Amino acid sequence: MSGPGASEPLEPHDAAAVFEKLKEAEAEGRSGDGKLVVWARVADCQVTRVQLVEGAWAFYQTLRDQSGQLIGREALRAATLEAIHKAESAALDKKHASLTKPEKRPDAAAAFERAAEAGEIDWDHSFIDFQRDYYSRLPKPPTEAERRERDEKAGFGREHHMPVETDPAKILATPVGKKVGPISERAMAWRAEQSRRLGEFSKGATVAAGDHDTSPTVAVQIALGGIVALDVAGNALASCTAKQYEDRVVKAARKAHEELRAALALDVPEEFGWAQGPIC
């Protein structure tokens, strides 16, 4: 346990086995208007599927505000981003629940014995009644989202959507090869540059990607914490079918994850004698 009130992590070998299973698991997020559903992979929170409910595409194509202006594109953009955020959050919650031990519930039997020994109840008091009353007076157990938030504040279980090491000190503190000798000025300069670059991402730097390199229908911006922005081309509702839009959201999200991984990759020059990259 890494802090007061934090959950107990699984043993490393157990966590590794669970994480393998999480690569196939998905979590769902639904937009507030109920017209769009997104699924994200639990292991890394990458968007895997998008589905517009029946009639949703026509709804967005004809949606107007009180002045008669078409507002479907903006509504679609907002609904998509909302569903993505909910799917990412649900994936993180499921991942956290899978990689930590369940909350320990207070033992009603032990509490019964303590109460009887203290003379608060008779030994022949109904245990069923005591147990029901005992648990009814306990605080409501936290939701998984609340548990994850609590653990992060306690310093345990803070995981980004992608399992990457972003602490420059840990990444760059690699031993110098025996044949290389003392760290050279070039090596020190390289370390400083990597430290600066990785530090930008830890402070919220983003990477952009779209479903098409030159004229994307869907474009996203992603940071270490997940997708932070999404844009939909002005002609999307007229030029795409619902299925095409779903596929393009998934493609843009996948490319964004790939671009972020590439941006975080650490190729260690062979001349420095350290373990070869990329490290990501």
Image: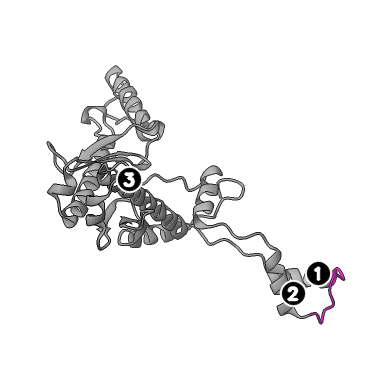
- In terms of sequence position, does the residue under pointer 2 or pointer 1 come before the other? 1
N-terminal of the two: label 1 or label 3? Answer: 3
258 inside magenta stretch: no
Circle 1: element type = helix
Residue 260 in which image quadrant: top left
Q: Nearer the viewer, residue 171 or 129?
A: 129
**Disc nearest the viewer among 3 and 2:** 3
The answer to whether residue 8 is left or right of residue 90 is right
| Of the image marks 3 and 2, the number of the one nearer the N terminus | 3
Residue 166: percent from the left, percent from the top? 37, 36
Q: Which color scheme does this rendered protein use?
A: one colour
Q: Amino acid at mark 3?
A: Ala
The location of residue 109, given as percent across then percent down, is: 71, 73
Numbered range of the magenta stretch: 117-125
Reading the image, the residue beneath label 1 is: 115
Q: Position of residue 201 (x, y in %)?
A: 35, 32
The one nearer the camera, 52 or 73, is 73
Query: Image quadrant of residue 242?
Result: bottom left
Q: Tell me the element at label 3.
A: helix
Q: Which three-letter amino acid code belongs to the residue tagged 2?
A: Phe
Looking at the picture, does residue 109 appear above or below residue 46? below
The residue identified by callout 2 is 130
